[in-house]
Image (cartoon, rainbow, N blue to C red):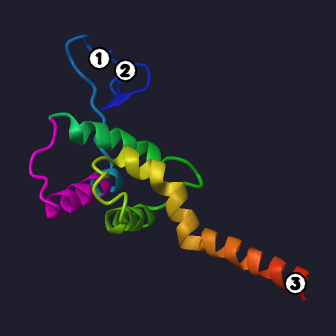
Amino acid sequence: MTLAGGRRSTGRPVSKGQMVMKKPYTEEKALVEYLKAKLESRGVLKLPRDWHLRNLSVARTMLDGENAPSVEEWKACIDWAFAHEFWGDKVDHLARVANLWPKYVLQKRGGKQGRARKKELIKQLYLS
């Protein structure tokens, strides 16, 4: 076990030859494995060598913060992206899912329906 500053809990510094690795959190790993399972269901059987590491770091930033969405919300976003007519075949890493989050939230809230309702209301007010 190491502490900040490169010191072990015993107080001795970590030698230069030793690497200090943080274990990936279970939530991050679950998110990466969920995307991997979705990709496998689409027929993607080979992934780049560093795919897992890159996606774990992206998952860490996706789940970091006070107002960050939960793992279940991210999984729902992944499901939405894979079911989407345009984005379905373009999602192959979590960075793409993170970029699609605002579109997912808007469609979940019915952003375009709100515009349509506003136009109908304006037409009713000015035409009647």
- Residue 59 appears in view: no
The range drawn in magenta is 31-48
Q: Which residue is mark 2?
A: 7
Residue 93 lies, with reference to residue 7, above or below; the image says below
Q: Is mark 3 in CB contact (under 8 Å) with mark 1?
A: no
Report the amino acid beneath label 2. Arg
Q: Which residue is mark 1?
A: 14
Report the amino acid beneath label 1. Val
76 relative position to 14: left or right: right
Residue at 15%, 43% (x, y): give it. Answer: 47
> How many numbered dots are placed on residues in this image?
3
Q: Mark 3 or mark 1: which comes first in sequence? A: 1
Residue 120 lies, with reference to residue 24, above or below; the image says below
Which numbered mark, 3 or 1, is in the foreground of this view? 3
**CA–CA distance in space, label 3 to label 1:** 77 Å
Q: Which residue is mark 3?
A: 127
Alpha-carbon neighbours of circle 3 within 10 Å: few (<14), some, or many (≥20)? few
Q: Nearer the viewer, residue 120 or 49?
A: 120
- Residue 7 appears in view: yes
The C terminus, quarter of image: bottom right
**CA–CA distance in space, label 2 to label 3:** 75 Å
Which residue appears farthest toward the front when viewing the image? 127
